[in-house]
Image (cartoon, rainbow, N blue to C red):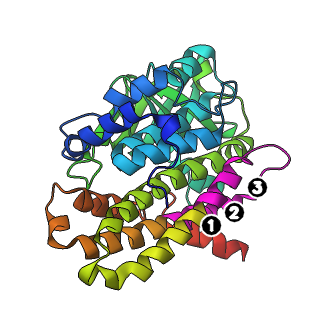
């Protein structure tokens, strides 16, 4: 099994820089955006965005390669890339262009919108018309990339219309970020809760795209790119474990071989799905849901084998193994959570 997914897409210099910074990012002593804005500037965080060069498969390769070195960086890249995808249709150029170009960080705060579309919970933000704009009130429990210079994209219940996509600067008066503290592996990702109290936005901040159409347009890409960082962490763990399969570690050789085969099979499925995220030949959404669930489960198993064969050295807090243990712990609770993914598959059964 190769330890790199698409090294030519990320490039050795960036990969080495991300790897070197991973301990500092893990300790919240460095900001993932310091590297990501450079990737954005040369178009590698807008690959496959409508109206831009590249493909979703190429974007998945970039995110997976980042995750092999630092999942917090890959997670921040994913959140930014999805924000760029959200605003690529229905928003004016002064909103969409800075995200696609990496000039402003993007924050994906769409989890509650997807849950609302599935009928799991109501939207947490309401928007009422006010003059030539709207006033927003409510809360989003979790979002990341909430830097002061970021654009956050969320779903709101617009009076007289229903659900719609809204993009606004984090610096908007009336929008407050309540930072999440002491996070495992993600302390540097600027994550927290959004509280909106009389936050006013112009009419152009609310997309005219019907919300059901929006969900159909973006959700496969959303899940494929999440799957990419799962596969990246998996390959990093299996690559690290490969050097420890002698002596007592040989007891795990069969487990390792099975996980490598499963990772390769999931990668093939992910590549096929990434090539069919839109259009009349788009893959069924449940294929993307199942892939995301399987990839997240595989991370936990791969990191478990890595920790077993590396031994006590992996329990030093600053070791790559310990970092991957913390990274893997996030995946069952990231939206869509493992419970939500199981529910969605069970409902369709």
**Real-space CA distance between mark 3 and mark 2, rounded to the nearest whole angstrom:** 7 Å
Kindly identify which numbered label has been placed on residue 290.
1
Q: Secondary structure of the magenta portion, mostly? A: helix
Of 120 and 109, nearer the camera is 109
Give percent across and percent down for residue 155.
Answer: 56, 40
Residue placed at 45% from the left, 53% from the top?
A: 232
**Residue contact at pointers 3 and 2, CB within 8 angstroms:** yes
Q: Nearer the viewer, residue 261 or 342?
A: 261
Q: Nearer the viewer, residue 58 or 94?
A: 58
Which residue shows up at 57% across the image and 72% down it? 342
Identify the residue position indicated by label 2 in the image. 287
Membership of 124 in magenta stretch: no
Residue drawn at (52%, 44%), measured in percent from left and top?
Answer: 6
Task: Judge left or right: residue 103 versus residue 49.
Answer: left
Upstream in the sequence, badge 1 or badge 3?
3
Helix, strand or loop for disc 1: helix
Numbered circle sitting on residue 283: 3
269 drawn magenta: yes
Tell me if 260 is positioned left or right of 50 in this view.
left
Segment tinted magenta in the rendering? 267-295
Question: Residue 107 has which mark?
Answer: none
Please state the total of marks drawn on the protein image.
3
Image quadrant in which you'd find residue 192? top left
Q: Are marks 1 and 2 in contact (CB under 8 Å)?
A: yes
């Amino acid at each position: 099994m190769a330890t790199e997914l698409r090294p030519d897409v990320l490039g050795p210099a960036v990969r080495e820089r991300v790897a070197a910074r991973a301990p500092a990012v893990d300790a919240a002593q460095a900001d993932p955006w310091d590297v990501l804005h450079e990737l954005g500037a040369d178009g590698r965080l807008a690959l496959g965005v409508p109206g831009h060069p590249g493909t979703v498969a190429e974007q998945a390769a970039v995110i997976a390669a980042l995750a092999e070195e630092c999942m917090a960086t890959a997670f921040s890249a994913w959140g930014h890339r999805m924000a760029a995808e959200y605003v690529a249709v229905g928003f004016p150029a002064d909103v969409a262009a800075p995200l696609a170009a990496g000039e402003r960080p993007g924050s994906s705060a769409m989890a509650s919108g997807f849950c609302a579309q599935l009928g799991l919970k109501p939207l947490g933000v309401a928007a009422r018309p006010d003059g030539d704009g709207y006033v927003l009130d409510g809360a989003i429990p979790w979002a990341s990339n909430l830097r002061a210079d970021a654009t956050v994209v969320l779903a709101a219940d617009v009076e007289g219309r229903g659900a719609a996509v809204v993009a606004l600067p984090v610096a908007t008066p009336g929008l407050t970020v309540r930072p999440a503290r002491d996070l495992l592996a993600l302390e540097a990702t600027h994550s927290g809760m959004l509280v909106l109290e009389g936050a006013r936005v112009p009419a152009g901040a609310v997309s005219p795209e019907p919300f059901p159409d929006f969900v159909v347009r973006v959700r496969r890409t959303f899940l494929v790119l999440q799957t990419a960082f799962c596969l990246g962490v998996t390959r990093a763990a299996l690559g690290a474990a490969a050097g420890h399969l002698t002596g007592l570690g040989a007891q795990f050789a069969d487990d390792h071989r099975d996980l490598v085969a499963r990772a390769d099979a999931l990668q093939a499925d992910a590549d096929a799905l990434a090539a069919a995220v839109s259009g009349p030949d788009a893959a069924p959404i449940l294929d993307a849901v199942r892939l995301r669930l399987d990839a997240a489960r595989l991370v936990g198993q791969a990191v478990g084998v890595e920790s077993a064969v590396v031994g006590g050295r992996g329990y030093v807090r600053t070791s790559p193994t310990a970092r991957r243990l913390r990274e893997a712990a996030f995946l069952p609770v990231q939206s869509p959570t493992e419970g939500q993914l199981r529910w969605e598959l069970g409902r369709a059964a």
